[in-house]
Image: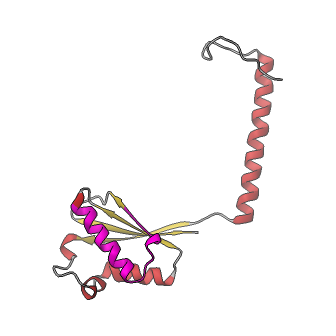
Amino acid sequence: MRLKFCRVPAYNYIPPPHALSDLSQQNMKQQFCKALLALVYFTTFGVGAVSEHNEILKRSEWPEYVNGTNIAALPQVSQTLKRFEEDEKIIIEIRYPGGDPGRLWAENLGRWLVTFGVPARYLQIFPGSGASDQLVISLIDRR
């Protein structure tokens, strides 16, 4: 059954009982079809697992003189590079403290990771590290 449009505002309109039963049956059919499609999709392609590993880099650990040797010697950076070499299906997310100094610090670290061989498309930089003196490096595995 098809409902006709009327000039009565929607919040005042109460459809007759037979229209509700037709709508609920149609709604149930739509829900069933959606569930069936989801079941077929997930059994065919599998469910993507998301796992995450975090490294916290404190401002006090950042070297005073920044060069490739000093940055690569940081345990957080070496762990990140090691995990990326093992599995290149991860995304490296860098969260920084708010403001320009934090953003510049995160971008600097990101440029070093690119220098060490991580493609820039695998890096994401966001505000919100949770503290004013740290970067959070998250390795997110999306399959």
Left-right relation of 60 to 142: left
Q: Residue at x 61, y 13 (%)?
A: 9
Residue numbers of the magenta segment? 101-125
Q: Position of residue 113 (x, y in %)?
A: 36, 78
Identity of the residue furthest to the left in this view = 64
Q: Residue at x 24, y 56 (%)?
A: 99
Q: Which residue is drawn at 21% across and 70% down?
A: 59
Colouring method of the image: secondary structure
Q: How many marks?
A: 0
Along the viewing direction, whichever of 78 and 9 lies nearer the viewer: 9
What secondary structure predominates along the stretch shown in magenta? helix
Along the viewing direction, whichever of 107 and 133 lies nearer the viewer: 107
Along the viewing direction, whichever of 78 and 52 lies nearer the viewer: 78
Dividing the image into 4 quarters, which one contains the N terminus? top right
Residue 111 falls within the magenta-colored stretch: yes
Identity of the residue furthest to the right in this view = 1
Residue 58 falls within the magenta-colored stretch: no
Q: Where is residue 3 in the image (x, y as percent from the top left)?
A: 77, 20
Q: In which quarter of the image is residue 97?
A: bottom left
Q: Residue at x 28, y 62 (%)?
A: 103
Left-right relation of 88 to 98: right
Placement of 122 over or under 115, stated as above or below: above
Q: Where is residue 50 in the image (x, y as percent from the top left)?
A: 53, 65
Q: In which quarter of the image is residue 110?
A: bottom left
Q: Where is residue 131 in the image (x, y as percent from the top left)?
A: 25, 60
Q: Quadrant of residue 27?
A: top right
Dividing the image into 4 quarters, which one contains the C terminus? bottom right
